[in-house]
Structure formats: C-alpha cells, structure tokens
Amino acid sequence: MKRNFDRIIFWLLGFLAYSNGNAEENSHLPVKKWEDLAFASHPTGELVLDVFRPSDSKKRPAVLCLHGGFWAKG
C-alpha cells in the first residue's frame, strides 16, 4: 500500500511540474472590466459584482464564482 501511494505522489508531482510551464504565457490577456456593479439593494447596502470579459469577441467558456454570504461570520 505504501509503495502504491509513493508512486501516485511521484506521478502527481511530476505532472504538476510539467504542466506549470504555460501559466505565465496566458496571464496577461487584455480584458474589459466593470467593478462594483450594483445588482440588488438591501437595507444594509447595495449588493455589487465585478465583471471581467475578454476584449476580443471570440466565444469562450465562462467562469462564475458565487459565495453564500458567510465570509463575514463563517
């Protein structure tokens, strides 16, 4: 069992080291950004969001990040 675990860790670390090469290459793509857009009103204030969109008009997959609101207490 220990031997199999060592093999998995070895291959996982090797894969991570190999796949990390292109991270810097794509990190500076031009984007349009809209920050603090109000989408709802609440007695304690407005609820806002940030939108980041590629500058070109090519179709791309979207990433939507949401949280449940308990970052302040949970």
Image (spheres, rainbow, N blue to C red):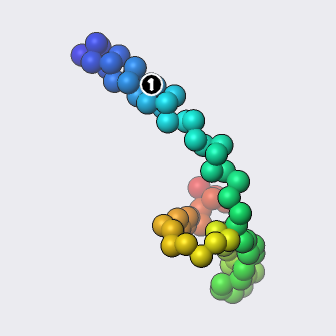
Judged from the image, the secondary structure of the residue bearing numbered disc 1 is: helix
Badge 1: residue crowd in 10 Å (few <14, some 14–19, many ≥20): few
Q: Is residue 53 visible?
A: no
| Up-down relation of residue 46 to residue 13 (above or below) | below
- Residue occupied by mark 1: 14
Tell me: 69 left or right of 2: right
Residue drawn 55% across the image and 36% down it:
20
Q: Is residue 7 found left or right of 27 in the rendered image?
A: left
Q: Position of residue 4 (x, y in %)?
A: 27, 18
Question: In terms of depth relative to the viewer, which is nearer, 30 or 34?
Answer: 30
- Who's the residue at 60% across and 43% down the image? 23
Q: Residue furthest top?
A: 3
Q: Quadrant of the C terminus?
A: bottom right
Q: Identify the amino acid type marked 1.
A: Gly
Residue toward you, 25 or 52: 25
- Give the x, y percent position of residue 43: 71, 85
User: Which residue is at 57% across, 35% downward?
Assistant: 21
- In terms of image quadrants, where is residue 70? bottom right
Q: Position of residue 7 (x, y in %)?
A: 33, 18
Numbered label tally: 1
Measuring from the top left, give residue 56's x and y in whole percent. Answer: 64, 72
Is 12 drawn above or below residue 26 in the view shown?
above
Residue 74 visible? The answer is: yes
Viewer-closest of 4 and 26: 26
- Asked where in the image residue 1 lies, by quadrant, the reply is top left
